[in-house]
Amino acid sequence: MKRFSGFNLIGEAFRSHQGWPEHWPDKAPKASYDAIIVGAGGHGLGAAYYLAKKYGITNVAVIEKGWLGGGNTGRNTTIIRSNYLYDESAHLYDHAVKLWDGLSQELNYNIMYSKRGVLMLAHNVHDVQSFKRHIHANRLNGVDNEWLTAEECQAYCPPLDISPNARHPVLGGALQRRGGTARHDSVAWGYARAAAALGVDIIQNCAVTGIRRGADGAIEGVETERGFIASKRVGVSAAGSTSLVMKMAGLDFPLESYPLQALVSEPVKPIFPCVVMSNTVHAYMSQSDKGELVIGAGTDQYTSYSQRGAFHIVEHTLAAICEIFPIFTRMRMLRTWGGIVDVTPDRSPVLGKTPVKGLYVNCGWGTGGFKATPGAGDLLAYTMAHDEPHKINAPYNLDRFRNGRLIDEAAAAAVAH
Amino acid sequence: MLLIHCPYCEEARPEVEFVYGGEAHIARPLDPSTYSDAEWEEFLYIRSNPRGRHHERWRHTHGCGRFFNAVRDTVTDVFETTYKAGEPRK
Amino acid sequence: MSGFRLADGGRVDRRTKRSFTFDGKAQWGYAGDSLASALLAQGQMLFGRSFKYHRPRGILGAGVEEPNALVTVDRGPGRVTPNLRAPSVPIYDGLHATSQNRFPSLKTDLLAVNNVFSAFFPAGFYNKTFMWPRGAWEKVYEPIIRRLAGLGDSPKTRDPDHYDATYAHCETLIVGAGPAGVAAALDAAAGGGRVILIDEQEEIGGGALSDPAQWGWLAEASAKLAAAGNVTVLSRTTAIGHYHQNFVVAAERLTDHLSLAEAEGPREKLWRIRAGEVVLAMGAIERPLVFEGNDVPGVMLASAARTFALRYGVAVGRKLVVMAVHDSGWRDALALQEAGVNIAAIVDLRRDIDPALAEAARAARIGCYTGYAVTKVTGRQAVTGVKIALDGVAKEQSLECDAVLMAGGWTPTVHLWSHAKGTLRWDEAWGAYLPDKSHENLRCVGACAVAWDFGSGLAIGALPAAKPLHESKAFVDFQNDVKARDIGLAVQEGFRSIEHIKRYTTNGMATDQGKTSNLNGLQIASDVLAKPVTEIGLTTFRPPYTPQSFGAMLGHHKEALFQPLRKTGIDDWAERKGAVYENVAQWRRARYFPLIGEDMDAAVARECLGVRSAVGIFDASTLGKIEVVGPDAAEFLNRMYTNPWKSLEPGRCRYGLLLGEHGFIIDDGVSARLAPDRFHLTTTTGGAARVLGMMEDYLQTEWSDLDVWLTSTTEQWAVIALQGPKAREVIAPLMEGIDLSAEAFPHMAVREGHICGVETRLFRVSFTGELGFEVNVPAQHGRMVWEAIWAEGQKHGVVPYGTETMHVLRAEKGFIIVGQDTDGTVTPDDAGLGWAVGKKKPDFVGKRSLARPDIVATGRKQLVGLLTDDPQAVLEEGAQIVADPNQPVPMTMIGHVTSSYHSATLGRSIAMALVAGGRDRMGETLHVPMPGGVISAKVVAPMFYDAEGSRLNG
Amino acid sequence: MVEIGVKIAPVAVSAADLKLGSGPVEGTGVRLSHAETKARYSLRARDAAVLDGVLGRKLPAKIGDTADGIACLGPDEWYALLPEGTTLPKGEGLPVSVVDVSSRALGFVLEGPGALAVLSSGCPLDLAKLAVGRATRTVFETVEIVVWREAEDRWHVEVWRSFAIWLWHAFLAAMHSSGGHAAK
């Protein structure tokens, strides 16, 4: 792996950059591996990287039906934060945020983690109560999250309209300063390059067609479009396609896959310094380093794998954006796209072992998986290496749907009364 | 915006009149107390989530108000058919 | 000056001059000119600076494919629009346009230094650097990158314009009003169905506008369409995207072509069209050629030069060289020459040229260099000449010129076809993806269906050149400064699918979304990888076809109309009384009624004492209400709610607790049995629609055998709550037909009668612990009855109170508010409502879940009361509770405060909290660590006032 | 009557300040007014014949049909718009539901050749195909309405009381817009 640095960049400039090698070699699958990861998104590639780097398992294949980073990793609005309410969630997401910090250096790949702050707006008394509850819980958990008055919110994000005449006036906000964004493609590419350098095989355009289990029920390997690949450890990190892969192993999962749309505006000069989220008005937005306003919408109401959503979702999303930021009505929408998000009944992920020996899963991240990328990768790797979950992901088991110990952040945010 | 044929109104109507109701043909047990925790979990949470033909419920909330069933391809989002609640799985 | 207005020709109105400014300088053009044509006529060749390297750029195209000439149009305060394409901006008197992405001026741009160092900024450079020293990314590099980002400036003040939207329906929708689209519209019109024809340009005609020979036909056809009663023609209207089942969304620009004085009404209009059949007649876009210097201002598409000359009467130079690999370049050259534009030479990489074209060119005295390629363009801010070489590699020779036209073949516009999930097939001859199959009732006609004669040509990536790829400065994506060598670098670095190449190089990700760059990028990648194009893939087309304003998308949902704000009939009485409001669900509710000089605490304290000592009046109209009617009504409620309902006597009320099937509380409310087969249910304000939907679900799909029906009556009834020891005295004089005596009308009873002459359903209920009534009257009479009660109440010291006081009063009694003291993870037992669960009932919604292992486990959070050691300390709602305040972070939190108030009645603070194992901790002191210090509080039962309930029976 | 013509002002105040207009408003080719006060009932029955018996009249049988002020909205649901003061028997004990909802909704009337365009501005149904004399429940943007086509160019719109202010002003906005259509 040729080291990335400003020095090498200048050196290469004098030979027209002909010396840069491939980020990762295109590998044909070997007959067997010590571990296989199904799905080469940020989570899966991260898991492969940490298996090799932290847990000493380097004979690893990442198998991807399309091209790496082409699923939700390349389709999200890149928001990173960890100011979740429950201890389980706060520990999970903060584990990721700690890994985000320094990830560029660790991977020797600038993933452009930008701690510009995530501001969540409170629009009614109930929001205020709920946000304060988050802030207090975060403080006692060692997670940064602070209350801002409406005026402080506007000072932090000048385009914000805090007029009391708004349909949903801003009463204040919760700010996590360590929150922010990262460059989504770079995350996948950085993990892929670093994993490949440690000996991980990245096998693209190779769909998994079956999962082979032995007489004892344990995993023996995966059938693919390019033949059988043996491994006693298979981790599935396939987002919207997880149900399909799990069915191959004979498992029914508490998952549903929904379309989720996002969009960007044309690029403009810097105007929007942070990430703003409003659950009440249903809008969230940041401005990319290129200058595009990056806007997330809500899911469509029905399950689908079409990566295509309805237009009225876009209408509602932009109406919400312009309600909170009325200066943007003349901005223009440049590109919309859709992803497939896999959603569990409590909208928290499943990360750990499955009833099948040797089969591990990382799924159910819904609309919020990007922020967890390094943490999810690390914890899946830990679980696969030790055949038991790390204490951070132990609560994210499948049993909770049977015993009722749900981790329902959305329910905790509760409903208006 | 999908166009959905309501089997009660007998016409295709715009999606915004409807509310999606999740997977169809998951009947609530007559006596839930006889269900084990695992069976109850399956009733509550396990969904087929197929890539392709999906049996699902919709309610024509802002129309005739009725729940009905549909078969839709989750890859193309094209409806194969819709039918009244209570009719057998198609 | 390198361009000029031709002596005649074009569709501009030469009798009407329009004056405008560009970069502050006065300019003029004719009515009908675009900003691009008017400026070209004045000799302006330099229009913009590229995104990354700030290279000088001119006009590339004459339509929406334009990547370079982006301008900001300023129509006054709040009316600033960045990133508009100069060829698509019609001029009007008073237009102010400015160039972008340059400092201080277009000609002298200091950031053009980026271009000098462009060798250090190849594709993906940012991934490779800015990592050390570690803190510098945040403090130095990222701020600089961000400052350099973006094209134009965002608007900075509120947009005074408004926007319109509509749905439309037709049997046939035609997108694109070029010759093929117009013909399709005439056909469809004859069929008698409703026809909508939309086109993005200022007038219909498409390519025919650049061909005077077709103007006669076009005028006739336009007249026919205008005369047809069943055709709607929408020009200045862009089809944004195709969505499921022929739902096509389009945006019409209504006023941007007019001066501010002329503009009236909305700025844009969103058309949401459902069509039986969609006919795509979107034409084709010419491809640029990739060669050294192809981005120098003055290098443009041949079709663009043709449009400027024949549609606008403007030559793009005095002496033009055409670089063609396609017959259409020859045709355009001949048409231009005929229109008076001097074509010095046609250079064509092909050796075999259609003899008719070659002959015509010779006859027109145009120099022909067949087998040649342009290898370099000379000039920096304008073209001064080209170098050409046989096969691109032989010895170079120079040609003098001031503009270069590129004819690289045609790309059918299949965007909407592709949005509709229509499949595409690769066609070698066209060098493009063509429409193949669709599952929608959708077809292509004209050029986008390749049913158009552009002649034939080569489909190539980059022109052959002696220089190796990695040294060339041949551009593929002009706006994003992606060069052919960047695509080579991406491939070299292991990016092999076109999606990877696109994302690594940003090819096709500029505001033109790759309309001129995608296929050249694909061809170059194919060449570098030595793989067929089809193995590299095609990036997905996504809406919108061209960038569209947020305003158009939101239509009427702007400002006051963003979302409905629901108000009760009594709301404006409260407004006049100076109420402070809070939003609850879609409603606004009076929160408190401050007297002059009072803050919330003072007002709430006064209101609370008023209720406890005399009587308060409260607008409870927002409560959800459902009328449950039918022989099986009681059976149905018995299945829905946790507690038994069948035994409830008509005339009596009962508190109902509703769980989700997961066993957690989702709603509650007091309901009344009016008759054996009729119940009046109430729900929480926010839960009304959800509860009705849930009940309909069970009724229709699980228990469809029950004869019972649900009707929302939330808005039928205004609800006026009278609470306090004087409540009865206030309403008694107004009431007819109801015996209000305690014996005849006990607590938790309902009676029907009249008040102030209108029917009422009178509930004797209490959410305050005081004697209380809730007067339900038809909403249209709510205000009248309210005022009558208010007037009567004056004798008894009535106070109006709001939701905040309501919250305090109920907390003093330990009554929960669903959504505040419960949060979607709370069971009846957790909330201390075990008494409301019918132990003997075999089943109700959620019952089975209450037996799950974690639900029956010990240590669950339970609702308790908290009394702070310092009676004046009011805990913050949401504050977290610990057993040991001295532990390090992360602390073990055992609960949180759900409700907390200063109680004026008790003269101290009270709170409710969910605490792990709370009911076993009675008397224990717990701690609430706050930033300012730890507050200690004792666990008590959640009942702070009148525990025996004697006041209810007043 | 307030003559405003196409100069109906675009809505610019805050949602909290919007008030329900009282008098009719005229736009280009369209007039918006309040319908006269009505008695309203929601009628439900599995078997229409039972309800026919209770009410002593024949209910329209097909969804969308109307008869004598009663519209069939669903397979077991009818909506009655009757002269003010009309009371209907409740059918106690029978498998029917008769609920007085007179106060729940307000009625607006849009009339004139431009009325269809105003309704279509926010209603996604192909209302041109709704025959005269038919009625349906649907939405106007996010707000539920019942549309009743009383004549070729006369539309009665029912909307729940608290949404009426928004709808009134949304109609005004559409009337304003259609008046200012595409000046060439």
Image (cartoon, coloured by chain):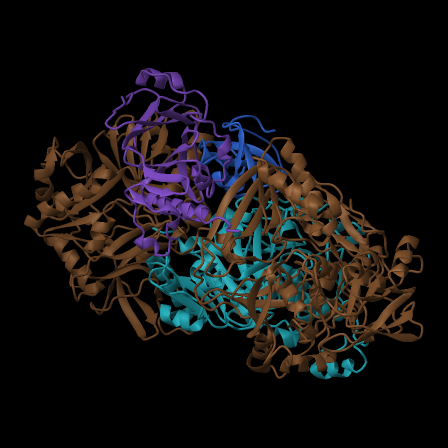
Position of C150 relative to D118 (above/below): below
Of C843 and C569, nearer the camera is C569
Res C382 seen here: yes
| Quarter the C terminus of chain C occupies | top left
What is the display colour for chain A? cyan
C535 sits left or right of D6 in the view = right
* Residue A59 horizontal/vertical position (percent): 76, 64
* Residue A299 horizontal/vertical position (percent): 53, 50
* Residue A155 horizontal/vertical position (percent): 41, 73
C781 sits left or right of C895 in the view = left
The chain whose colour is purple is D
The chain whose colour is brown is C
Res C421 seen here: no
Of C124 and C79, nearer the camera is C79
Of A174 and C863, nearer the camera is A174
Position of A201 relative to B90 (above/below): below
| Quarter the N terminus of chain C occupies | bottom right
Which residue is at a point 44% across and 71% down the rendered structure image?
A158
C158 sits left or right of C769 in the view = right
The image quadrant that residue A32 belongs to is bottom right
Instruction: Residue lying at the far left in this picture: please name it.
Output: C795
* Residue C565 horizontal/vertical position (percent): 34, 50
Position of C181 relative to A329 (above/below): above
The mark total stands at: 0
The image quadrant that residue A269 belongs to is bottom right
The chain whose colour is blue is B
